[in-house]
Image: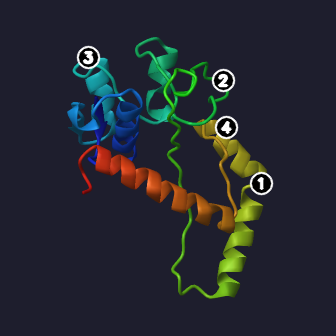
C-alpha cells in the first residue's frame, strides 16, 4: 500500500479499511513515499499493489486506463466519476479528506462572527462553485457550530484508527 506520511489521512483510511475488512491494520505493509508524485510513480510502475490518494492525483490516470479506481472513501460518489464508495463495495468505512478554517480560542467574538459570515458568503459564490467543479471537490461546508461537532467526531475516529495502526497507544 503506497502513500506518503505515517499517521496522515491516507494512513488513517488504510487502518479503517483493514479493520473493516477483518485485517489487523498493523499487518498492512504501508509503504511511505516522499509525496504524491512518488506514490503515483510507484503505482504506475507496479511497485505497490494498491495506492491511496486524492481524486485529483489519480483521476487522469484512471480516466486513461493506466490505473483502476476501486472505490472512493466519501459517503457519496464523486459526480462524473463512476466509482463506487467503500460502503457500496461492502466495507463500512466513510472518510473525507476535509479542510477547515480555525481560529484561536482567544479570537474576539465579533471577529469570529465576521469570519464565519465571510466564509458563509464565499461558499455561495460562483467562484467557489467553479473551484469545486474544476478540482473535483465536493462541497462539505459546515457553519462554525456544525464544524465544531464534526471535529469532535473526527478526533475520536482518527484517534481510534491511529491506535489500530499502532501509532498511538
Read off the residue under disc 3: 46
Q: Residue at x 67, y 28 (%)?
A: 79
x and y, in percent, of residue 25 in the image: 28, 36
Residue closer to the observer: 66 or 154: 154
Q: Nearer the viewer, mark 4 or mark 2?
A: 2
Task: Decide: few, some or many residues near mark 2? Use Cα within 10 Å; few <14, some 14-19, many ≥20.
Answer: few
* Numbered disc 4: secondary structure: helix
Q: In this picture, is 81 found above or below 154?
A: above
Q: With 102 as the anchor, is 110 left or right in this view?
A: right
Read off the residue under disc 4: 133
Q: Residue at x 31, y 45 (%)?
A: 164
Q: In this picture, is 70 found above or below 151?
A: above
Q: Nearer the viewer, mark 3 or mark 1?
A: 3
* Numbered disc 2: secondary structure: loop
Q: Residue at x 47, y 19 (%)?
A: 70
Which mark, residue 114? none
Instruction: Kindly indicate whether the residue at mark 1 contacts the one at mark 4 (C-beta within 8 angstroms).
Output: no
* Numbered disc 1: secondary structure: loop
Q: CA distance from mark 3 to mark 1?
A: 42 Å
Read off the residue under disc 1: 125
Q: CA distance from mark 3 to mark 2?
A: 27 Å
Amino acid at each position: 500500500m503506497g502513500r506518503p506520511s505515517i499517521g496522515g489521512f491516507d494512513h488513517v483510511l488504510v487502518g479503517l479499511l483493514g479493520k473493516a475488512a477483518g485485517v489487523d491494520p498493523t499487518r498492512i505493509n504501508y509503504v511511505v513515499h516522499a509525496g504524491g508524485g512518488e506514490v503515483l510513480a510507484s503505482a504506475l510502475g507496479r511497485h505497490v499493489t494498491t495506492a491511496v490518494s486524492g481524486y485529483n492525483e489519480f483521476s487522469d490516470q484512471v480516466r486513461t486506463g493506466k490505473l483502476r479506481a476501486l472505490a472512493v472513501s466519501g459517503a457519496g460518489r464523486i459526480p462524473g466519476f463512476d466509482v463506487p464508495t467503500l460502503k457500496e463495495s461492502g466495507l463500512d468505512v466513510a472518510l473525507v479528506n476535509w479542510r477547515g478554517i480555525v481560529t484561536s480560542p482567544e479570537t474576539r467574538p465579533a471577529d469570529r462572527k465576521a469570519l464565519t459570515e465571510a466564509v458563509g458568503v464565499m461558499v455561495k459564490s460562483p467562484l467557489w462553485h467553479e473551484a469545486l467543479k474544476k478540482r473535483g471537490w465536493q462541497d462539505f461546508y459546515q457553519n462554525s457550530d456544525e464544524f465544531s461537532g464534526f471535529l469532535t467526531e473526527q478526533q475520536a475516529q482518527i484517534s481510534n484508527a491511529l491506535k489500530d495502526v499502532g501509532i498511538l497507544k
